[in-house]
Amino acid sequence: MPTTHLCKSCGQPITGRYLNALNADWHPEHFCCTVCQQPITDARFYVHEGRPCHPACYANSLAPRCTHCNKALTGQYQINSWGDRYCSDHAQTMASCGYCGRLVPHTTKRMRRRSIEAVRCDHCASTAIENTPQAKLLMTNLIIWVEAQGMGFRQKTFRIELLDRADFISRKSGRRDPLGLTSSTRFMRQKRVDHAKIESVAILRGLPHTLFEGVCIHELGHVWLVQQNIVNLPSLDEEGFCELLAYRHYIEIGSNVDLFYARGIAENSDAVYGGGFRKLKRLEERVGFAQIIKALLRKKKLPL
Ligand SMILES: [Zn+2]
Ligand SMILES: [Zn+2]
Ligand SMILES: [Zn+2]
Ligand SMILES: [Zn+2]
Ligand SMILES: [Zn+2]
């Protein structure tokens, strides 16, 4: 006795020719495309959510489209941190945005080598901080946020500047980070730092808004340390502390862009910035942020 084949589509027994596909039997005329509902006669077909479809129907109606050329992505393709999908070969020709990593049309890989700001995508450009009044306004709110972390400032007025790359590099004094620079003067008495005055906080011009905030928070960490006369921390501890502060801000705001930059801090391969952050993050998880602040204020160093 031959076994009875039931058609997966209509549920009726199949007496003549039948087709076996997707772990089921079908009347040949009932094995239909999920898009156009017409029978699939070719041995080559696509499967979309468990349903068969014509390769052409898949490409026309279901396949994701390339962000850059709008071609249907039916073979291998790439996807970036923002969920954009694109043809694999674009990554060979276009440069990626120095800030967010998106591929930028009309660029070449060579352009990217110059500096972080050499290639900036439209997303990042549309929120960029380009002038000082804008920067000052944002900084006012960021100072309030930092103070709410238990970090009071002795002096809240200092110069805030946006610098182009050349000026940023040529600035001599201060603690230089990749995108920010805090300058201060230390007043000595009997060979010890008596007090310190913040002269200015400079940020590289043109950073996208979210990154600008993170960089400012980091610099405000340095400002606070100087104002509290905590001037002898090893670089690993100081940069780690400032990165932790910026990280906390990104996590608190929590937009997908903030979380992207938070990940950047956590995964930074740099020994001082990345290594310092991871050291401070472990410390924070063990003793809590408030305890870190308390120890810094009382003992001018990190808690054990
Ligand atoms: Zn059938
Ligand atoms: Zn079809
Ligand atoms: Zn494409
Ligand atoms: Zn970008
Ligand atoms: Zn720093």
Image (spheres, rainbow, N blue to C red):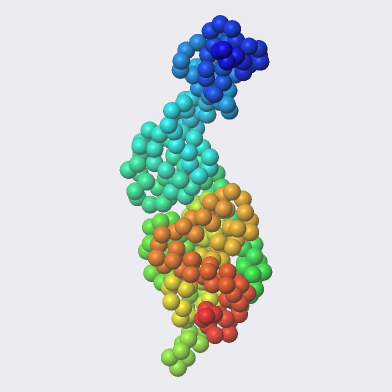
State whether residue 84 is above or below residue 165: above
Q: Position of residue 132 (x, y in %)?
A: 55, 58
Q: How many marks?
A: 0
Residue positioned 41% across, 67% down in the render: 272
Is 194 in front, or is 83? 83
Q: Residue at x 41, y 59 (%)?
A: 269
Q: Nearer the viewer, residue 117 or 74?
A: 74
Q: Residue furthest front?
A: 1
Does 127 sit above or below residue 148?
A: above
Rendered view: 56 above or below 89: above
User: Which quarter of the picture shows residue 252?
Assistant: bottom right
Residue 172, how many percent across, how many down? 38, 69
Residue 40: % across, % down:
53, 13
- At a point 35% along the width and 44% down the height, the residue shown is 111
Q: Classify the position of the N terminus by image quarter.
A: top right
Residue 257 or residue 192, whichever sits in front: 257
As drawn, 181 above or below 205: below
Q: Is residue 205 visible?
A: yes
287 with respect to 76 (left or right): right
Q: Residue furthest left?
A: 110
Residue positioned 63% across, 74% down in the render: 290
- Using the rendered image of the protein, determine whether residue 197 is visible from the camera's viewpoint: no
Q: Quadrant of residue 37?
A: top right
Q: Is residue 206 left or right of residue 3?
A: left
